[in-house]
Image: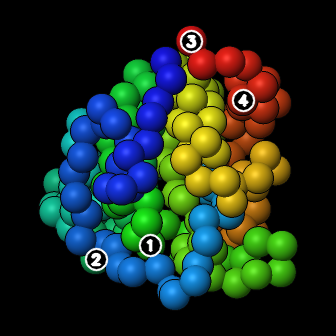
Amino acid sequence: MPHAIDTGRGLVVGARFVPSPNQDARPPGATLDLVVVHGIGLPPGEFGGDWIERLFTNRLLPEAHPYFATIAHLRVSAHVLVRRDGELVQFVPFHARAWHAGASSWRHRLACNDYSIGLELEGDDHVPYEAAQYRALAALVRALRRAYATLAADAIAGHSDVAPGRKTDPGPAFDWARLHAELAGADT
């Protein structure tokens, strides 16, 4: 399932677009040179529904679940969410800064949000991700690399890599070797 990027709009062609207010302009001169892979389930360990979309659009109801009361105040987003079935939902255009990595650094550079693309997988640190997610993620990363020449082949990291000690996602259930094998394959 090859993907295409509309670089003028900063959107994945064919992805469902749900605009998030949790974004702003990247700093002048910032180049896209990192992909950060995240994992999120809301509530933790549960999948489906619109809770992630509600979180990323500031519409999460604190009373809907005890866990939501602890996070509903957060103003966070990602560029794209990869659902369990491989569906792509985009929240922030790639040319804008999504608020996904928080306090972070990569290769001695601070503030990863300034120069990275945040890709969320619907999942949990300890629940295996779905084959459809690996295929969709790999196809998306390949499309991003075609669209943005500044994204090198080794420019991919987990949230836990850019915010060690603070974040654990995408967690031990994420199979990096499988992703790299998928990335080496051709779009079908």
Please state, as top left, top right, bottom left or bottom right, where the C terminus lies in the image. top right
* Residue sitting nearer the eye, 6 or 52: 6
Residue on which disc 3 sits: 188
Sequence-first tag of 3 and 4: 4
Kind of residue at badge 4:
Leu
State the SS at label 4: helix
Kind of residue at badge 2:
His
Residue on which disc 4 sits: 183
Q: Say if residue 124 shows up in the picture.
A: no
Residue furthest to the top in view is: 188
Query: Quick check: 152 left or right of 15?
Result: right
Q: CA distance from mark 4 to mark 1?
A: 25 Å
Q: What residue do we see at 55% from left, 38% from top? A: 143
Sequence-first tag of 2 and 4: 2
State the SS at label 2: loop
Crowd rating for badge 1 (residues with CA inside 10 Å; few <14, some 14–19, many 20+): many
State the SS at label 1: strand
Image marks 4 and 1: residues in contact by CB distance under 8 Å: no
Kind of residue at badge 3:
Thr
Q: CA distance from mark 2 to mark 4?
A: 36 Å
Q: Position of residue 32 (x, y in %)?
A: 60, 65
Image marks 2 and 4: residues in contact by CB distance under 8 Å: no
Between marks 2 and 4 in the image, the one whose residue lies nearer the viewer: 4
Q: CA distance from mark 2 to mark 1?
A: 19 Å
State the SS at label 3: loop
Q: CA distance from mark 3 to mark 4?
A: 12 Å
Residue on which disc 1 sits: 97
Q: What residue do we see at 24% from left, 71% from top? A: 21
